[in-house]
Amino acid sequence: MRIGFLAMSGIRAHDPELLALGLTLPGFVARSKQIAALPSLGLLQLAACTPSGHELRYFEAPADGAEPRDLYDCDLVAISTFSAQIFEAYAIADRLRARGVKVAMGGLHVSVRPDEAADHADYLVIGEGEVVWPEVVAAAERGATSARFDGRAAGPVDLATLPTPRYDLLAGRPYSRFTVQTSRGCPWRCEFCASTVMLQQRYRHRPVAHVLRDIAAVHAVQPGAFIEFADDNTFVDHAWSRELCAALEPLQMKWFTETDLSVADDPQLCDAIARSGCRQLLIGLESPNERALRGVEQRADWKAHRARDYGRSLHELQSRGVTVNGCFVLGLDDHGPKIFAEVLDFAERHALWEVQVTVLTPFPGTPLHERLEREGRLLHPGRWERCTLFDVNYVPARMSVEQLRAGLRWLTERLYADDALRRRRRAFLARRRAARYGLASSSRCAG
Ligand code: B12
Ligand code: SF4
């Protein structure tokens, strides 16, 4: 069979004023361009799990809702879904099926809303895809009319069995950044989290040798490409993390990942991260305000307990030259209109190299979605295309919808302006120099 793997590419947002603003802010544009171009690791991983004897092609659907013409030459098309692009994906699937192409859908959105997706796909996959994908291919080969496959039935995928994703399918395309996975899952359970923890929560990491094998495969396709680890929370197991960083060090490559702040408790790990070529850690700080963090992490209230320690933890990383992309979620229930200035002040005080601000988003399948639905606070139920992290879809507790929208714009304008970026980065470099040469540094008492 000819099998096509279709990724929905690009970044989504609907608030027109925010979009207009985003287009003019250098810091915002630079990061959006970098990430919007990432290929879909889930699909490349599935391609690697496809039984032999089939012709495989990787496609991207641009953000304008159209699809590449060559897709219609396929016998089976696998579409990966996020909530924000789900209606575009359904429309493409409908057109393909009308022309006799079989469609399989999987990914985060259809895993939590399979009944909704059933009208648009021949084959639906819930949860992690690797184990059941060969069964989907077999079903398509024998022309089975429709079927559902539950990737959760066999338990969490053993990551040590994963083959190298088929990065070679991307050869000749202009990607400069690629994703590699080192782990899946996270020990925490944040109310709003819609990451791959939704497919399978348990934290698992891959053998370090396999991570190196995948990086080599990326660099065979694109020498020197920047690597982003597509993990939920990379450094949960500190001993394994030190081993991973030690193995990355000789590669002299640049990389980026997402983690929680507990890395800062392990000075040896912080040293290893700095030596290994890590350019940046993306960390969900969520709020500078401890009270607002109460209840956000539902297992041990970990994020609220950690908040008092943000200053020290950030210093541990930044003093070693590791830049931090601090992520803040605006509109938590305790956030009033002062939160925007508080985030701005925190970012300046702690010299954050990058800052990511998003609005609280009730993604389907999350505890947050269930709670806001119960409380009658969802503004646009079922309008999944608005699940972009930038559009307000619920009634905030301590401000109006318009205050939240306007506050996001106000903050975006100030955080990403040229002079603000320069000021924060100069402060970061000065503190790093001070730490390196043992000079007194103001960041130790920054908060
Ligand atoms: C890399 C990444 C991107 C990249 C690449 C996306 C891509 N084309 O794959 C880019 C930058 C383009 C991106 C864009 C967006 N992203 Co993003 N992104 C991620 C990130 C960091 C990693 C995803 C990943 O690679 N996971 C690893 C792979 C192996 O897992 P997977 O894709 O889920 O695939 C597995 C299964 O789902 C399944 N599967 C997946 N597809 C299919 C298809 C079939 C047929 C089958 C059988 C199985 C199957 O099998 C795979 C293997 O087990 C996650 C955060 C995270 N840590 O997970 C956010 C995340 C996925 N993104 C998110 C969001 C919100 C967005 C945007 C809407 C942001 C925006 N405003 O534009 C856009 C979406 C626009 C779009 N194109 O659809 C949310 C999604 C929430 C949701 N439930 O919808 C996440 C979880 C982050 C978050 N803050 O919550 N993103
Ligand atoms: S720490 Fe991050 S990955 Fe883990 S549950 Fe919370 S938001 Fe999700």
Image (cartoon, rainbow, N blue to C red):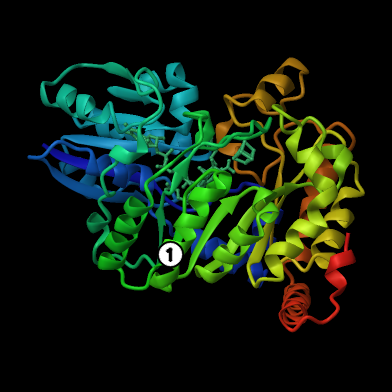
Q: Label 1, on which residue?
A: 248
Is 172 on the left-hand or right-hand side of 40? left
Q: Please indicate, yes or no, whether residue 147 appears anywhere in the rendered image.
A: yes
Is 28 left or right of 3, judged from the image as shown?
Answer: right
In the rendering, at what x and y percent does residue 181 appear?
Answer: 41, 49
In the picture shown, does residue 43 fall above or below 249? above
The structure residue drawn at horizontal position 51% and vertical position 30%, both measured from the top left corner, is 202
Could you tell me how many numbered marks the image carries?
Answer: 1
Q: Nearer the viewer, residue 304 or 106?
A: 304
Q: Residues within 10 Å of mark 1 (few under 14, many from 20)?
A: many
Q: Which residue sits at x=90%, y=41%? A: 336
Q: Secondary structure at mark 1?
A: helix
Q: Nearer the viewer, residue 391 or 208?
A: 208
Quadrant (top left, top right, bottom left, bottom right) of the C terminus: bottom right
Q: Nearer the viewer, residue 142 or 247?
A: 247
Residue 94 visible in this rendered orientation of the protein: no
How far from the left and from the top, in percent, is residue 83?
52, 35
* Residue 226: quarter of image: bottom left
* Rendered image quadrant of residue 43: top left
Check the image and report above or below for 324 versus 124: below
The quadrant of the picture occupied by the N terminus is top left
Q: Is 225 positioned to the left or the right of 397 in the image?
A: left
Does mark 1 have its CB less than 8 Å from ligand 1? Answer: no
Q: Nearer the viewer, residue 12 or 95?
A: 12
Return the x and y of residue 75 as percentages of the image width and height: 15, 35
Residue at the spot 75% in from the left edge and 57% down from the top edge: 313
39 up-or-down from 250: above or below: above
Q: Position of residue 248 (x, y in %)?
A: 43, 64
- Residue type highlighted by circle 1: Leu
The residue that appears at 67% across and 28% down in the rendered structure is 380
